[in-house]
Image (cartoon, rainbow, N blue to C red):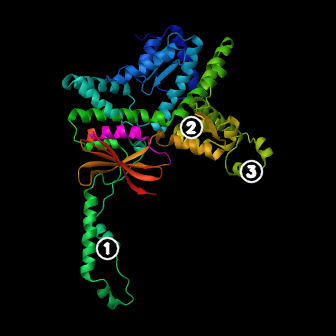
Amino acid sequence: MPKALSQKLSDMQQSVEQTAREYGLDIFETIYEVLDYDEINMVAAYSGFPVRYPHWKWGMEYERLKKSYEYGLNKIYEMVINNNPCYAYLMESNSLTDQKIVMCHVTGHNDFFKNNFAFAHTNRKMINEMANHASSIRRYMDWFGVSEVEAFIDKALSIENLIDFNAPYILREKAIIREDERKEDIEKSITRIPAQHEYMEHYLNPESFIEKQRARLKDEQEKLAQRFPKNPTRDVMAFLIEHAPLKKWQADVLDMIREEAYYFAPQAMTKIMNEGWASYWHAKLMSERMMAPEELIDFADRHASVMATSPHQINPYKIGIELFRDIEERWNKGQFGSSWEQCDDMMAKREWNKELNKGALKLFQVRKIYNDLTFIDEFLTLDFCKRVGLFAYGFDKRKQEFVVESRDFNVIKKKLLSSLTNLGHPHIQVLNGNYENRSELLLEHIHEGVDLDLAFAKETLCNLAHIWTRPAHLLTKIDDRTILISHDGTNYKENIVANQ
């Protein structure tokens, strides 16, 4: 069972939060709970929430975390939940220095959750909502059977990334097309043979010929009007909830999983910024105000382990904190703007210092209005890339190992931005819910240079066919060929649509 904070930890929390507020951090009330290693693994398996709906995947995640801890491969120092009040967990076996670092780190996350634009739409009472979801799904399991409900959850979870991650931040207006506009579009689309003289118009473009074109174009417009959705939609889950022939409990379960997917999406959209911001503040608070001299070695050891880099992947803590520090230094010295960009004198750039001291102000502005994609696009510079030593890597099939592909700045930045676009997931959108007038589902993969993993696509398409209860199809590109992959829930097939 969770344990209340000791008086020493409670005093430490008050000191950390008071110091953080003096530095300008704006946080929710924070509630800490102390857990042993087994309890913290259980909560971590539930993504930090104490109660989730029953499903086998939580058990698998718990076993993975438990083994990682026992084998010394992984240790959970902290967990924090985007909620109001903000909930965070402390490992019971951690030293007091560890707990202090964790509290400073949590305070950074808390401030980021409260103030970054990406979290503005999220449910700040999600702990209660998760418990409600768990209660509803348990009730459905009692009514309809564990196997049936769990099997449907399996299918729903396979498409939980098929949402429009940017939808909460975009206000879309519905297009209303008037009848006179439809007629005008038809007249513009009619093909007429050019006549040099007006008296020839009747012979070259007889009324019967024009009327046939009008009828054909009107028929095409009516077919387009009957097609749904009217425009391609990326929120596949919402489309299924609205249009798939689901039972009431199935639609409710799908809606719950979709709601949770939208709740977690901002955390994925800001992983580098969020971890970088928390790391920046735990380092700043500890080194400037909170650390006792005898804690220096332990702090340096813990901080270094968090900042450790790997040749195979980006460490969001490291890249995030280094970018925030780079921004602070540049805006303190005035190393930005047109005059800085146009300066070609390397010596002058090295000595550039206008002593503007705008670094802190800029950091809080960046924390508020950027996500990882815009953060990297705006602030990852050539100078930063060289200083930190970033490079692009890839897997060499011949050598069967990861190798450095490029140290070129443009290649590195493009690859990093590509990995962050749509959270690294393929862009999938619904084109037609009545494909070939057979009530079949047609989706499209918006190809952006990376082919689909057909093994995953096949299984996901199978699950979509079961949810839609009719065959599901997906347009994509493989090796520069446009293909249509299809699944009816039992059989899978591929057809080449066109060669590029």
Neighbour class for label 1 at 10 Å: few (<14), some, many (≥20)? Answer: some
Q: Residue at x 34, y 76 (%)?
A: 191
Select label 1 or label 3 by which is in front: 1
Label 1: element kind: helix
Residue 152 at least partly seen: yes
Residue assigned mark 1: 187
What kind of residue is marked 2? Answer: Lys
Q: In this view, does 406 lie above or below 69?
A: below
Q: Give the range drawn in magenta.
A: 449-465
Select label 1 or label 2 by which is in front: 2
Residue assigned mark 2: 397
Label 3: element kind: loop
Q: In which quarter of the image is residue 192?
A: bottom left
Residue assigned mark 3: 343
Q: Position of residue 217 (x, y in %)?
A: 28, 69
Q: Where is residue 157 in the image (x, y as percent from the top left)?
A: 35, 32
